[in-house]
Image (cartoon, helix red, strand yellow):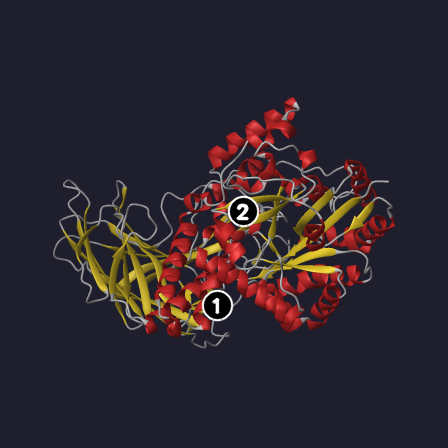
Amino acid sequence: MTSLSLLFGVHAHQPVGNFHSVLEDAHSRCYHPFLETVHQYPEFRFAIHISGWLLDYLARTHPEDLERLRAMVARGQAELFGGGDTEPVLAAIPHRDRVGQVRALADKLARLLGNRPKGAWLTERVWDATVVPGLREAGIAYTTVDDYHFLCTGLKAPALNGFFTTEEGGTRLDLFPISEELRYRVPFSPAGDAVAYLEGLADAGGQAAAIYFDDIEKFGIWPETYQWVYEQGWLRDFIEGVLGSRRIRTLRYADYHAQARTRGVVYLPVTSYVEMNEWTLPAEAADRYAQLVGQAKAAGTFNQDKAFLRGGIWKNFMSRYAEANWMHKRMLGLSERFHALAAEQQSEAMRTYLYEAQANDAYWHGLFGGLYLPHLRRAVYAAIVRLEGLLDQASARPPQVRADLDLDGHDEIFLSNGHLQAVVRLDGRASVCELDDYALGHNFGDTLARRIEHYYRKIQLQEISRGPQEGIASAHDRVAFKHEIVPADLVPDAYPRHLFNDRWCTPEEEHPLTTYILKSESTDEAGVTLACQTGEQAGLWVTKRISLSERRLRVAYAFNGQSGGTFLTAIHLAMPSCDGPAGRFVADGRILGGFASVLTLKQARELGLHDGVLEGALTLRASRPVTLTAHPLYTVSQSEAGFEKIMQAIVLSASWELGRRGRARDVVLELEMGPEVRVDVHNRVNWRAQEPQGASGVLARRDGSEGGT
């Protein structure tokens, strides 16, 4: 009787900077019960990849689970898979960092679990042949990608039951094709059906293997899966069914790799899994792609043609989201600075921050929150800011540097003074796109603009999901609403959500100021002057001076011309507390409300923003009385738990009447950063507040668990 080798692998990951409550929930509903269950079946061999940051967390908080895993490794049941330590997309970071990241995790696995990996998990299965030399240099012999990658080369699905070999510049790497059919069956179809499906594959004979490697979070964290997998016994039934079958044997990838021969040479295109290729597309292109897929499914040709209905590639996220692109280019620039240092200047703290800045989760968005989750972006920026502070100590920069960092055709001016950094865009708006405080390790400019997403069509159509006749629905098939969404929530922004976006308003119309030009710059000071003329007929000239002093950002406005009207500047501020209880507006020692409040203060000269999560405060001061308004900025995104609204920033606006020539019109605004100031919580005033729509919690990545902001 022919037999089948089941190569069963799971991938465990949590993003750098995720909430403690989310991690604990993931442990109790997934990591612990999974390891506890498989430990009871020594003959059930499997592979496991745990990303480095999560591995560190488990070692600190749940060492007993790692001891259980160490025992399974020692008895030959479990195989450890490596990869990048902080789970970077290897194709998106430099070669030297690929090698360093993979070696860092291998060292960690050897120290904590007693074994160095031969195989590696490829983050989000993003394949680019340029990663081959780095993986091999770091000691990796094989990795896993989706069978979809192979289908794109013209290979047929029945042939994808073993490993293949590729090379890049003569460097060899073996590739295992993960079965999409198994990914969708395990653990969502009944255990008996999954075992029967595997037994049916045994008819292929020879050295046939069924290859499974997917997120462990599907075993307990995705909606309904904890009850299904553990309380109703799916995992136990599946393991016992596999072990009880005369046609299935479980093997570690390393054992199969040592016994079997390659199925031949293959060269894969740059791609990822099918869903990712759709998520990388802009909304209009994704709509068209979905139409083509729908037509193919209706015609019954999708399964045979899907490899040729290909979407975008992972790096398209840098083109789709300017915010992701900016983070990415900041990370690349700091990597270059780090590696340019002499070896004795490169500290472990620098390397740790560099690797944390490369964690993939905050750079993209699909079914999972990713880029839309402020705490994930904040973790990346915290690493960027802290690394930059250390690099500046090792090799000082001039107070002013000009470059087109994000490759958008417009230069930026980086102003820094050792305490703060302000990045001024020279795209006509003269806004500040990044404001870093090195003591707090925070970028106050880390916001996300609202834009149209492909899945908004599901919201507009109010689609209702229907699960399978048996088993449970995968998160990919569910449509649910975590928060109430109204049409106004889906209106895209017309401009980036930066600091000091200026507008001049008259009774007739509103003039966004988009024609600022650079008037003066100097590499010897942290300041720059820009000027804007609104037009010959309008007759208003604005001079805008942006400078740094200690921990203060100073923006001075001066006006010429006869025109009156109202001048307004919008300051979008990323405050870690978001709409949670630890953030509050303070004026004259009084708490005015939380950051989700809608606030108006007339004839104001000062407003404080105190943030308990940040353990810091920001104070806005005006040189003369202005009108201050504040309201929260929410975006709408999808997650496996449903469509949700997430607070991205506080929109703080300062406005004042210009009057006519001869009247005081010039204004200086200052933002000063510092430690959080204690305020008597009983010293409150009444204010008109509009409660935010939606809860204060936000989803972390793939796990459907909430964590308060």
Q: Is residue 527 visible?
A: yes
Please, what is the three-letter code of the amino acid marked with disc 1? Thr
Vertical side of 22 occupied by 112: above or below: below
Estimate the x, y position of residue 473 in percent, counting from the top left. Answer: 71, 42
Using a 10 Å C-alpha cutoff, classify the residue at mark 1 as few (fewer than 14 neighbours), some (14 to 19) or many (20 or more). Answer: some
- Secondary structure of the residue carrying tag 1 is helix
Relative to 340, residue 458 above or below? above
Name the side, left or right, on which 207 lies relative to 494. Answer: right
Number of marks in picture: 2
Q: Quadrant of the N terminus?
A: top right
Residue 169 image position (x, y, % from top left): 47, 47
> Is there any visible trace of residue 222 in the rendered image?
no
Is 668 in front, or is 284?
Answer: 284
Q: Nearer the viewer, residue 211 or 693?
A: 211
| Measured Cα–Cα span from mark 1 to mark 2 | 23 Å
Residue type, numbered disc 2: Val
Picture coordinates of residue 113, whole percent (x, y): 67, 68
Local secondary structure at mark 2: loop
Tell me, for residue 403, which label it has, or none.
none
Q: Which mark is residue 126?
A: 2
Q: Which residue is mark 1?
A: 352
Residue drawn 45% across and 76% down?
679
Q: Quadrant of the C terminus?
A: bottom right
Report x, y in % for residue 536: 14, 41
Question: Going from the N terminus, do you reach mark 1 or mark 2 first?
Answer: 2
